[in-house]
Structure formats: C-alpha cells, structure tokens
Image: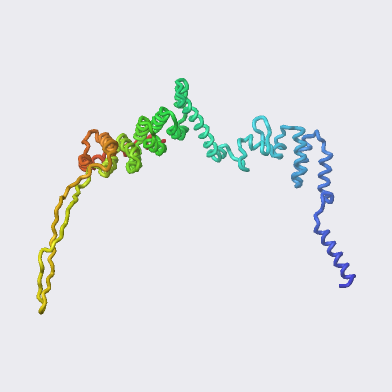
Amino acid sequence: MTPRFASIVLALAAVTLLALAPASAGDDPGRADLERRLKTLDAQDVQAAYKLALELEAAGAADLAAKAYEIVVGIDPEHRAARRALGFEKIGERWYRGNELKRAKGFVHHDGRWLTAEEFAAATRPQREAAAQKQGEQRVLGYLGMIASRVPDKVTKGKRLFAVEDDKYKLAPLAQALRCEPASLRIYAAQQLARMADPLSAPALLKRAIYDKDADVRRAVVLALKEIGSPSTVHPLGRALDSRFRDVRVRAAEALGLLGDELAYPYIIKKWEGRAGNFPRVYFAQTNQISYIQDFDVEVAQTSFIADPIVGVLQEGVVQAVKIHATSQSFLIHERPAFNGALGNLAGTDLGKHVGAWRSFWLENKKRLLDGRADRYAKLAEVRKQKTP
C-alpha cells in the first residue's frame, strides 16, 4: 500500500465515524431551543408553564416536560393534570406517588413485591400462625404452672385463666403437663384432654396409662382415652401385655378393663392362657429297665450249631400325669387378679378365676360383642363428623 493510498483510507474512515457518531444535546438546535424556552419561562404563569410542558412532552423531551410539570405544581399544588402527569394520585386530602402511593392504597411491600392486604395475609399466614401458636402455648404453660403451685389462690386463678383460653393452644402444654409433678396437675391435664377429646393427644395419654406411678393418674388418663374413643387405642395396650416387666403387664390389663373396648377380651384371655390356667395335661414316666437273656435261637449249619440269644427287658417304675397351674408365683398374686378384674369390668360380671370360663364366654358372645363395638364407633364417628365445621 502506497503512502498516498493509506492516507485516503484513513480519511474515509474518519468521515464514516463522524457520520455514525450521535449528535450531542448542544448539536441539536431543536433541543437547545426547548431548553432555552424552559429557562426563560415565567415561574408564576401556570397556563404558560402547563402549555410548555405539553409541547415538551409532544416533542419527546420527557425530562424537560417533567421539569415544566414540576413548575406548574409549584405554582398550583392542586393542578390535577400536572400532578397526574408526574405520577401523583390524590387519596383523601393528600397527593401520593411511587412507594408512598402503593402504601396509601393499602399495598404492602414483602419479599421484593407489592402485595394487597389479602395477598400479604396469605403469604405470611404460616409465620403469623406459628408465632401466635407459640405465644398462646406459653400463656397456657404459665396457667398450668399456677395450677401446679398448690397455692389455693394461684390454683383457682390459673384454672380460671385456663378455662377462657382458646383450646387450640392447650394440646401441647397439656401433653407436657402429663409428665410433671404434682399428681394433681397430671390428673387435671388428663381431665382437660378428655374434655377436648382430641385424637392427637392419644399417644401421650397411652404412655402415662402404663408408666405413671400414681394409680389415680392412670385412671384419669384411661378415662380420657375412653372419652376420645379411638378404635385403635386397644392395640398398644394389648401389646403391652407382652412386656417383660410384671408391673407393665398388670397396668396394661387394668387399663384395658377400664377402657371398655370389647376387643380387649382376646388380648387378655390369650395372655392369661399363656401364663396360667389352660395348659394341657402332660405325662412323664420314671422307670428302671433290666435286660436279660430270655432264650437262645439255635440253628444247625452242616456240622455246626449256632445259638442266637433272645434278649428280654424288665421295666419297673411309675407314670405320672401333670398339669401346670402357673408359671410363677407372682402370676397368682399379681397378674391373675388383674386379668380377672379387667375381664370382669368388660363383661360387667365375674366368671371366676379359671380362664376356661372366660374363653367359653368370649367364643359364645364374640359376634354380638364385636358387632356392638362396630356400631358404637360408627355412631361416634358420625357425631364427630357433624360437629366438624
């Protein structure tokens, strides 16, 4: 490339760049004229200022038009057209725009969005409900603490405040109170759970029905379970009859009897039979055995004689019949009375201390008892369904 040709190319490139470069505000005679008119505007003439603002907006100079509208509003704060052009809206006696306008209209800024009051309530409901639930449960725990104090005046006040509190805050604190001293508090908690009859309280009540050391508390707990009336309550108590601890077995039997569920019959009878009563009769022999040669069986083989001895057996001794009545002494003292009492509570009568009589009663009345149980729970479910809002 010759020097002359290179200079020509550079000159053409420079011309092209100048042609493509945007013109500055100072290079636009129309814009300059608009700016001049805005600067020379009479700041006290509302009509002139508003007219110029419209011209500026029509010319596409939105920034200059906004300044003109601001001049109009400065002269006449109630100029509606200028206010609206600037994004203002009048609510009540005040003009608002931007975020203030959103808030004045009732919108709430949450998580980077403007929400209506209904949308904000729906979005924050879980947090608000959780906070309200926690506060309510703390109040209820305070009332239960007053009841546990054993001070008559505080106990009375605590019960009064507890009575007017919403039930939805009571379930967890009452379940916690079932594990606290004194026993009177646990009884009160069980009675309140019975009144509420909420199936969600059943797990906490079941545990105390077995493990609480106070008999009165256990009774109140089982009565609460009976009031709740869940058909599945009998199963965990029935399984507790297989515990390796005697006290647990006895308390489970007592709870089943007090619960009044007919399905407890097979659980108790089976356990009773497994521990004592209906074992089969067995036999064992104690003998002495003596072997002797009774005779010989002689055979002739060619010129020889073969004598095979015939062995006899003598036995002497005795054969005895045995029936096991109990696997341990503790069963007769503790468990059998508990099983017998539980079945007596269920049947409303006492068939005695022999499990065979109870088994016969169950087999004869099984269908009637289970049909009555099914009807009872069906009616209870229907009543609860009608009460559910």
In the visual, does 238 lie left or right of 15? left
Position of the C terminus, as image quadrant, is: top left
Residue ID at (64%, 34%): 104
Does 28 appear above or below 368?
below
Q: Nearer the viewer, residue 372 or 271?
A: 271
Q: For the view shown, which residue lies furthest in the right direction? A: 4
Answer with the quarter of the image where residue 48 lies: top right
Q: Position of residue 354 (x, y in %)?
A: 21, 39
Tell which of 346 and 22 is nearer to you.
Answer: 346
**Residue 158 to residue 213: above or below:** above
Residue 141, can we see it? yes
Residue 262 visible to the viewer: no
Percent from the top left, x then y, of residue 222? 35, 34
Q: Is residue 113 left or right of residue 65?
A: left
Q: In front: 189, or 121?
A: 189
Q: How has the structure been colored for display?
A: rainbow
Residue 105 is situated, as x and y percent measured from the top left of the image, at 62, 35
Residue drawn at (75%, 41%) of the image:
66
Question: How many numbered marks, from 0 up?
Answer: 0
Residue, far top: 153
Quadrant into which the N terminus falls: bottom right
Answer with the quarter of the image where residue 196 lies: top left
The residue furthest front is: 304
Identity of the residue drawn at 28% across and 41% down: 328
The foreground one among 266 and 129 is 266
Q: Can you give x and y, in whole percent of width and height, for residue 150 in the image?
A: 45, 23
In the rendered structure, the answer to whether residue 51 lies left or right of residue 227 reads right
**Residue 311 appears left or right of 372:** left
